[in-house]
Amino acid sequence: MDNFFKGLTIIELSSVLAGPSVGMFFAELGATVIKIENSKTGGDVTRSWKNSHEIASQSNEISAYFAAVNYGKTHVFLDLKDPKEKYQLDEYVKSADIITTNLKLGDAEKLGLTYDYFRSLKENIIQCQLSGFESDKSRPAFDAVLQAETGYMHMNGHPNSPPTKMPVALIDVIAGHQMKEALLIALLKLEKENLGSYIEVSLEASAISSLANQATNWLMSGLEGKRNGSLHPNIAPYGETYQCKDGKWLVLAIGNDKQFKNLIKILNNKKLEDGKYQSNQNRIANRKALNEVLALSFQGKERDEILKGLLKAKIPAGAIHGMKEVFAGETAQNMLIHEDLNGTNTIRPSSIAFRFSK
């Protein structure tokens, strides 16, 4: 699979996270990805987005954020307002298959980077343009703003906490997947019909399309997602977290009544046998009381010991891990990829989470 897209050339005229994540995906699968960066501004803005540890140690020339989605690329710095340097881009485009862009409204025309212009250089070129808001393409868009305006922050957090942004730039990640899917379809079209494509993806539409059951809860029953911690609106106990005797935490994800009956056996707490907990409908109605009983049950247990029992009984539960524990695990270790970028030893998990066995 490493060379599946060998011979494919992508010009990356996009920055930050969503667009670059697409380039890295194809680079990992063998494509040649040429990332064009603005020589006047020092390149992709995320090169300078350093965390507090990086600032304190002054150890890395580029940020860990930039390294996350810029593996396996050729980096070319150009001033596209300079005709001579614009000519270099033109030469790259002539031999390219795909161009990814996240140009602000009007910039494509100002810089002469329209799809019609790219087609004049290569007729069957594919371009994927990422914008922020479908409803207003002139608005500057950042992940936090999109999380706010597409409902995510409204639902995220605890009941008494303010609306909360998720710590991962989730909307960028989702939009990156939409771009990949669209480009794979465009490549099929190119293969079948020898025709290029102009594709538009927006962060806004990507976010709305991923609201999943929270969208249908509202559209079909009028139930609006609200800040409820990690709790699932339709199932209980699902998303409830419990601190154990040793101070470690776990989460439950009970999906049916059989699993709950097995939980009663493992915890050996007679209070859980109350009729008001024996169906999911009743558990939802009596969620607060149920949570109190479960919290007391787990307080007397060692986390890893009780977790073994839960998993043996096929009860969906998991240890709550920090980054140290995640990347000590075999799965994460097997996903790590290294690259020297400008003298900085960079490391990140692969963007490829699938394997072809045959």
Image (cartoon, rainbow, N blue to C red):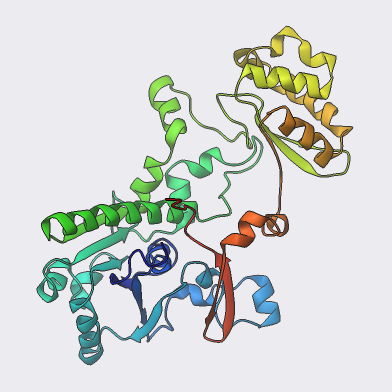
Q: Considering only vertical position in the picture, is 177 above or below 65? A: above
Say which residue appears at 60% left-offset and 14% top-offset. Answer: 281
The answer to which quarter of the image holds residue 262 is top right
The answer to whether residue 174 is seen in the rendering is yes
Q: Which of 32/297 is in front?
A: 32
Number of callouts: 0
Seen as rendered, the residue at the extreme top is: 275
Say which residue appears at 37% left-offset and 80% top-offset. Answer: 37
Seen as rendered, the residue at the extreme bottom is: 84
Give the position of the N terminus as an image quadrant.
Answer: bottom left
Estimate the x, y position of residue 53 in percent, counting from the top left. 69, 73
Estimate the x, y position of residue 267 in percent, counting from the top left. 82, 24
Q: Which of 7/350 is in front?
A: 7
Estimate the x, y position of residue 20 in percent, counting from the top left. 40, 67
Estimate the x, y position of residue 246 in percent, counting from the top left. 88, 43
Q: Which of 303/357 is in front?
A: 357
Q: Considering only vertical position in the picture, is 288 above or below 186? A: above
Q: Is residue 191 left or right of residue 301?
A: left
The answer to whether residue 103 is seen in the rendering is no
Seen as rendered, the residue at the extreme front is: 358
The answer to which quarter of the image holds residue 282 is top right
Q: Is residue 176 left or right of residue 244?
A: left
Q: Is residue 334 left or right of residue 307?
A: left
Say which residue appears at 12% left-offset and 68% top-offset. Answer: 116
Say which residue appears at 62% left-offset and 58% top-offset. Answer: 332
